[in-house]
Structure formats: structure tokens, C-alpha cells
Image (cartoon, rainbow, N blue to C red):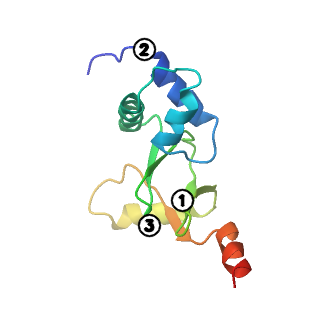
Amino acid sequence: MPALKYSRQREAIRHFLMTRRDHPTAETVYTCLREEFPNISLGTVYRNLTLLADLGEIQRISSDGGAEHFDGDLTPHQHFICSRCHRIYDIRIGGIGLLLDGAKKAAPGRIESCRLNFYGVCEQCARSSKDSQ
């Protein structure tokens, strides 16, 4: 594969994601970067997010809410996804190594990566539903 040409917009997208902990959607990235790049298009943001995810430089996270979210944090961690508001939270738990070791022994091939998501109702949504009762 030929070397990738440098792009200020792509670098800005990567930097933006690395400074965030809220797992924004492409639309959020687009809205925030328009201040710095008024001529950037939503299509450009989508293409660059897809490219960065395909290159393994960011993570793409799918939730049941339909929109894909993106994460610039590549350190080992898991995600909690709220089934009501679809917010995504980083969580870091121990013991994943034991799970991965067991999976490597049981898998019919070589495991190259693992992503673990937990689903439930976040505290904010749980409080909201108690308040409305």
C-alpha cells in the first residue's frame, strides 16, 4: 500500500478524538471541526474516520442506537453502552487477560484482537426514570 498523503483535516480529526472521552459521532466531529475548517464537508469527515478506523488509529464503536461512535483512546479498555441514551463510557476492568487466555485456548484459530462491550442503563437514565415516576 502506498504511503498515505498528509492531510491537515485528517490530522485534526485524529487529534480531536484523542482529546475526547465522550466517543463522538461523525456529526459531532464535523460540527466541532467546522470552527477550524469552515469548508470541511461531512463526507470528508466520514471518509477520514473510516480510513483512520481501517488503519487501526482510532476505534469505531457501534451501538444499538444506529450511529457509529469513535474513540481515539487505543489503550486496552472496555465500553459500557447505555441502552436508553446510547452514551458510551470507558471502563477499565482487571481479569480480561484470563478471559483472553481462555478464548485463545478455545478458538479454532489465532485471536488477533478483542473488544468487549457491556450494555445496560447508565446512572443518569436510571435517575431520570425514577424522577418521572
Q: Residues within 10 Å of mark 2 (few under 14, many from 20)?
A: few
Q: How far apart in space, not on screen, are marks 1 and 2 (Cα)?
A: 37 Å
Residue at the spot of label 2: 6
Residue at the spot of label 3: 102
User: What kind of residue is marked 1?
Assistant: Gly
* Pointers 2 and 3 in contact (C-beta within 8 Å): no
Report x, y in % for residue 120: 56, 72
Label of residue 97 in the image? 1
Q: How far apart in space, not on screen, are marks 3 and 1 (Cα)?
A: 9 Å
Task: Please tell me whether residue 117 is drawn above or below residue 40 in the rendered image.
Answer: below
Q: Residues within 10 Å of mark 3 (few under 14, many from 20)?
A: few
Report x, y in % for residue 42: 41, 33
Callout in the foreground (1, 2): 2
| In this rendering, position of residue 60 left or right of residue 21 | left
Mark 3 or mark 1, which has the lower sequence index? 1
In this rendered view, identify the residue nearer to me: 67 or 99: 67
Report x, y in % for residue 123: 69, 69
Q: Secondary structure at mark 3?
A: helix
Q: Secondary structure at mark 1?
A: helix
Q: Secondary structure at mark 2?
A: loop
Q: How far apart in space, not on screen, are marks 2 and 3 (Cα)?
A: 41 Å
User: What kind of residue is marked 2?
Assistant: Tyr
**Residue furthest toward the bottom?**
133
In this rendered view, identify the residue nearer to me: 129 or 13: 129
Q: Residues within 10 Å of mark 1 (few under 14, many from 20)?
A: few
* Pointers 3 and 1 in contact (C-beta within 8 Å): no
